[in-house]
Amino acid sequence: MLLQLLVALPALIFARWVWKTFIAYHPLDNIQGPASPGFFRGHLGLVFSSWPGRKWQVDIVDTYGRVVLLKGFFGARQLYVADPRALQFMTVKEPEIFEEQAQFISNNKATLGEGILATLGDQHRKQRKILNPVFNVKHLRELVPAFTDIASALSKGIAREVHNGADEVDLVVWLSRTALELIGVGGLGYSFNALDGDTPHEYVVSIKKLGFAAFALQVWRYFLPYVENIGTPALRRALLKVTPSVHIQNIVEAVDVMWKTTLEVYSQYGAPRPESTEKDTSQFKNNIMMVLKQANQAANPAERMTENEMKGQINSLITAANVTTSRSLCRIVNELSLHPEYQARLRAEIMAAREHADGDLDFEKLEALPLMDAIIRETLRRYPPLPLMPRTCQKETVVPLMHPLTGRDGKTITELTVPAGTDIYLGILPTNIDYETWGPDAREWKPERWLNQLPKTVGDAHIPGVYSHQMTFLSGNRACIGFKFALIEIKVVLSMLLAHFRFSPGKDEIEFVHAGIYQPTVNKVLVPTMPVKVEVLRVPGEDAEKVRNTV
């Protein structure tokens, strides 16, 4: 009898799953979507594809509507959502119902620690409450001089690679190293010396290694929540060390380096380097970690972050700021190289401001450059670093729509009943380039749109993003907490680069491919690289007067 039960129970469980998945009525079955390419992983291979991924996401929205039915593992129903009202409902009105996917949280906790990228619910709200004041304008204004010194070091490094006036330079290397130093000095009060010498800091190498390995295992990471608590941490680590996977070994090696650096930073965060000059000390004392430490100490004891949470913030800040900032800068420089007329206009704007300021630009001067602001806004709108963000519905919920859908049965759908457990992809890219919102030129890179009055349809769309009518930095309680920090970094670096160099396309066409975040590459090789022709207009450190006639 017992043996029969043991045999029958799995069969009953399997039969129930078959019934629910393939036979019983499901509230999402009337939503249109592409046919699944396979039973095991459904559309996941296309959603996270390096090459057709971006185009495919836009194409399915164009074809089926702003909500698309997809399939995940073993036929599980998923939704791709690019409807502004649905996005507002999910990210602003009911964010606790539409939480980050379990695999996202588990992966971040395993690699980055208990920082803001790896927590949910009350713990996330507590961390965000303490972190919010850290990114206010007062602190950003104080960081600009330090950022300017770093951007100057970047310019000198690039100039060393240029011979005979013009040469191709792989800017992804330099911009990655710069982004690390910016978050190091401005965020942690710690210099990685990332721009010293020709060898990038091991943390830069580790972030790159971790990013590509994690993306290669993107589909398999969905199983992480089911195995992350098996055995002891020591046992899990031992099993990982003997796993015959290059990607897993790269992740283990990268995480070891990152945590070694984190412990080094944490042991002295907020403190100036022993060899720092008085000027250097003033740059290091206003860093985010020092302000965070003070805010944490001032908080109610019950609301304070633990030591592990504070360490987790270090990895979270570095990882989030380094990759997104450097890749956004890569995209902007690439667009400027392809559009020399905008590059010339921006350089003229920068040089006029520098002449008026008698040198480097402070926070207020950077914020008063309309063309620079327009170019940054347009690049982030048209080419968001992340094309989507995953969520999971925690309980059955009715979601309103701005744009009605036509169901498979031909009837109009004005709201969705989303069952608990449904995985959802928030469509950042299709929302940012929607024709009905932005007009017939929505998919053009056109900074001029920000220098004129935006179409009424942009305001009417009520896109819930925290920045400039776009979803690039998301919205609600999971929006990018440091987006203003990133924007001022970008402005400082651009103001320095355009003052010294002219950029034009190299001999190889640069393509940005989806690898967790969009990465520049050439010749279909999944390694970040961005060779751009760089012409020196003024050797860094020389009098600005020498460049005025070259604008």
Image (cartoon, rainbow, N blue to C red):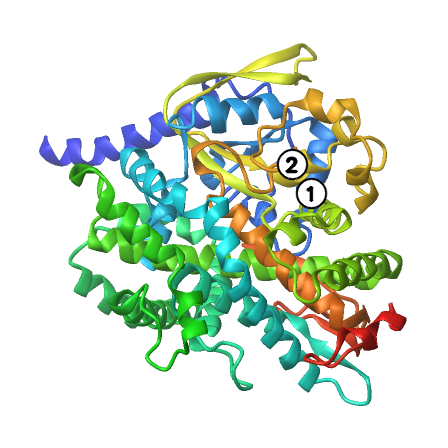
Residue 479 % position (x, y): 48, 38
Q: Amino acid at mark 1?
A: Arg
Label at residue 468: 2
| Nearer-the-camera pick, 273 or 542 | 542
Tell me if label 2 and label 1 are in contact, CB under 8 Å.
yes
Secondary structure under the numbered disc 2 in the rendered image? loop
In screen coordinates, is 447 left or right of 494? right
- In the rendered view, tell whether residue 396 sits above or below residue 245: above
Residue 214 % position (x, y): 45, 59
Residue 222 % position (x, y): 40, 47
Q: Quadrant of residue 164?
A: bottom right
Residue at x 17%, y 65% (from the top left corner): 234
Label at residue 391: none
Q: Amino acid at mark 2?
A: Ser
- In the rendered view, tell whether residue 399 sits above or below residue 256: above
Q: Residue furthest bottom?
A: 164
Residue at x 33%, y 32% (from the top left corner): 14
- Residue 329 at least partly seen: yes
Quadrant containing the N terminus is top left
Q: Earlier in the sequence, mark 2 or mark 1?
A: 1
> Spatial distance from mark 2 to mark 1, Cα to Cα?
8 Å
| Residue for badge 1 | 381
Residue 197 % position (x, y): 53, 86
- Residue 527 at least partly seen: no
Which of pointers 2 and 1 indicates the residue nearer the eye? 2
Residue at x 45%, y 61% (from the top left corner): 186
| Nearer-the-camera pick, 432 or 427 | 432
In screen coordinates, is 425 left or right of 337? left
